[in-house]
């Protein structure tokens, strides 16, 4: 896989949807130069959410986390570009919004860790797992962005 085709899984959580932040969040990834590969607006099932956060199943906040994530529709997305996993995490800010710098999504839009409005994959490996969990292969588009030559020098 070419480095410029790295992909990450980003999801706007129910609080981000309810607070009217969908457009602002998508805009940041668009303006950065990343390519939108897939997006939907869905009410996730409990089964899907449990699987998505399976690595946290023994943490005390797991049940509340799954309930919160299922409390309304979410916007799962796949974004593509050079180092998009790492850069996406930088754009999100820290897990706890209190530790997130202004200028980051969590730093700008939220206050508490249990209402931190957005998810982003933490590694290329987990991105692959999460993309496969939320999207079918045929939902991932492979168009070439007309901005590509202006975003990358090679
Ligand atoms: P991240 O979402 O930054 O990858 P994570 O994977 O460690 O963070 O945890 C997943 C989500 O679980 C996180 O976005 C919010 C929630 N969470 C994490 N730590 C928590 C805590 N101490 N109390 C309540 N919710 C927590
Ligand atoms: Mg995580």
Image: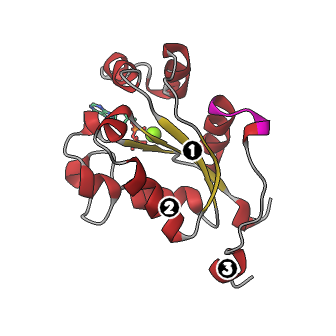
Looking at the magenta stretch, what is its main secondary structure? helix
Residue named by callout 2: 29
Residue named by callout 3: 152
The stretch in magenta equals: 134-138
Q: Position of residue 68 (x, y in %)?
A: 34, 24
Count of picture labels = 3
Q: Where does the N terminus fall, quadrant-wise?
A: bottom right
Under circle 3, the secondary element is loop
Q: Earlier in the sequence, mark 1 or mark 2?
A: 2
Q: Earlier in the sequence, mark 2 or mark 3?
A: 2
Q: Are marks 1 and 2 in contact (CB under 8 Å)?
A: yes
Horizontal arrangement in the rendering, residue 96 relative to residue 39 (left or right): left
Q: CA distance from mark 1 to mark 2?
A: 11 Å
The residue under the point 53% across, 27% down is 52
Task: Name the mark on residue 77.
Answer: 1
Q: Is residue 89 above or below residue 19?
A: below
Under circle 2, the secondary element is helix
Task: Name the mark on residue 38.
Answer: none
The residue under the point 21% across, 40% down is 112
């Amino acid at each position: 896989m070419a480095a410029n085709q790295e992909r990450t899984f980003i999801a706007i959580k129910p609080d981000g949807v309810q607070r009217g932040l969908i457009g602002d969040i998508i805009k940041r990834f668009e303006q950065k130069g990343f390519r939108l590969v897939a997006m939907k607006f869905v009410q996730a099932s409990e089964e899907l959410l449990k699987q998505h956060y399976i690595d946290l199943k023994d943490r005390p906040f797991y049940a509340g986390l799954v309930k919160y994530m299922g409390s309304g529709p979410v916007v799962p997305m796949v974004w593509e570009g050079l180092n998009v996993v790492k850069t996406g995490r930088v754009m999100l800010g820290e897990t706890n919004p209190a530790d997130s710098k202004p200028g980051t999504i969590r730093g700008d839009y939220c206050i508490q860790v249990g209402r931190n409005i957005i998810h982003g994959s933490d590694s290329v490996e987990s991105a692959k797992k999460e993309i496969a969990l939320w999207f079918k292969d045929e939902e991932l588009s492979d168009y070439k962005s007309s901005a590509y030559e202006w975003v990358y020098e090679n």
